[in-house]
């Protein structure tokens, strides 16, 4: 499952990059596609996560909002686990 997520993420990144190269306003839809691919790759690959954390520490303005969004999402995810019926 993790391998499929990583491969799918890399494919989305590649497709998004190709779409981004289109001229004019046709290229903008490539950004959300690349974002979805990056999310899949980061959720499936420990090496990619490590690179992301190192890059986020070097460039906090660029990665800060995304890192905060991931952190709050994860906190909500773990907070909901305790309230589920067993």
Image: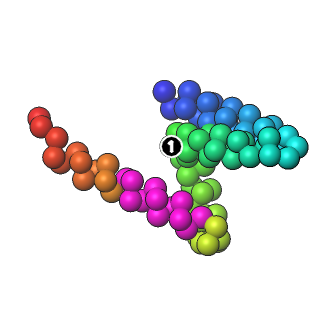
Q: Identify the residue at image location x=42%, y=59%.
A: 71
Q: Compared with residue 52, is residue 31 higher up or lower down, i.e. above or below?
A: above
- Residue 16 as seen in the image, left or right of residue 56: right
For the magenta stretch, what is the residue range? 63-74
Residue located farthest toward the right when viewing the structure as drawn:
23
Element under disc 1: helix
- In what quadrant of the picture does the C terminus appear? top left
**The one of 82 and 26 positioned closer to us in this rendering:** 26
What type of secondary structure mainly makes up the magenta span? helix
x then y, percent, for residue 76: 31, 53
x then y, percent, for residue 29: 70, 42
Q: Compared with residue 23, is residue 52 higher up or lower down, i.e. above or below?
A: below
Q: Which residue is mark 1?
A: 43
- Residue 84 as seen in the image, left or right of residue 5: left
Q: Is residue 73 magenta?
A: yes
x then y, percent, for residue 47: 59, 48
Disc 1 packing (10 Å; few <14; some 14–19; many ≥20) = some
The answer to whether residue 7 is seen in the rendering is: yes
x then y, percent, for residue 36: 59, 41
Q: Identify the residue at image location x=62%, y=36%.
A: 9
Q: Identify the residue at image location x=63%, y=30%.
A: 7
**The one of 10 and 32 positioned closer to us in this rendering:** 32
């Amino acid at each position: 499952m993790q391998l499929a997520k990583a491969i799918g993420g890399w494919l989305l990144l590649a497709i998004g990059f190709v779409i981004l190269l289109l001229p004019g306003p046709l290229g903008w839809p490539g950004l959300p596609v690349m974002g979805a691919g990056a999310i899949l790759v980061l959720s499936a690959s420990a090496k990619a996560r490590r690179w992301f954390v190192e890059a986020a520490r070097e460039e906090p303005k660029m990665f800060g909002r995304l890192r905060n969004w991931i952190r709050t999402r994860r906190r909500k995810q773990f907070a909901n686990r305790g309230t589920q019926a067993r």
